[in-house]
């Protein structure tokens, strides 16, 4: 069981959240040019990296905010969790 420390609600079980895709690659554009296939690929077709991985999660059964989570895929430890609007800069795994 993964516990995600929502900045507004505190630690909650992952069952309250919906996975929103990798934050390692840019999301498809939010316009009519993006297809269902683009979004399917972004959310569901992904690599399985070992180590820190930046991901979007939606607190569906809580505050309904989008979060940017850095999760270590080796042990599911949450290294950082913040509001998604802040962007991925400075999170573990950020090479910039
Ligand atoms: Zn929340």
Image (spheres, rainbow, N blue to C red):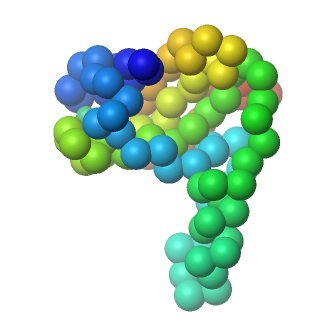
Q: Picture quarter containing residue 42?
A: bottom right
Left or right of residue 85: residue 72: right
Q: How many marks?
A: 0
Write the residue at 60% across / 55% down: 43
- At 68% from the left and 15% from the top, the residue drawn is 74
Q: Nearer the viewer, residue 86 or 62?
A: 62
| Residue 86 visible here | no
Q: Indicate whether 35 appears above or below 67.
A: below
Give me the residue at 40% from left, 45% from top: 18
Quarter of the picture holding the C terminus: top right
Residue occupying image coordinates x 73% and y 48%: 46
Q: Position of residue 8 (x, y in %)?
A: 23, 28
**Whether residue 22 is visible:** yes
Residue 54 picture quarter:
top right
Q: Indicate which quadrant contains ligand 1.
A: top left
- Name the side, left or right, on which 79 lies relative to 35: left
29 over 5 or under it: above or below: below
Q: Is residue 1 left or right of residue 72?
A: left
Q: Position of residue 84 (x, y in %)?
A: 45, 42
């Amino acid at each position: 069981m993964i516990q995600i420390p929502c900045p507004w609600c505190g630690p909650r079980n992952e069952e309250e959240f919906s996975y929103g895709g990798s934050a390692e690659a840019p999301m498809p554009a939010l316009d009519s040019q993006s297809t269902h296939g683009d979004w399917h690929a972004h959310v569901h077709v992904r690599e399985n990296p070992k180590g820190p991985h930046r991901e979007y999660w939606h607190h569906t059964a809580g505050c309904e905010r989008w979060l940017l989570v850095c999760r270590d895929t080796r042990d599911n430890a949450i290294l950082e969790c913040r509001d998604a609007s802040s962007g991925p800069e400075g999170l573990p795994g950020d090479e910039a």
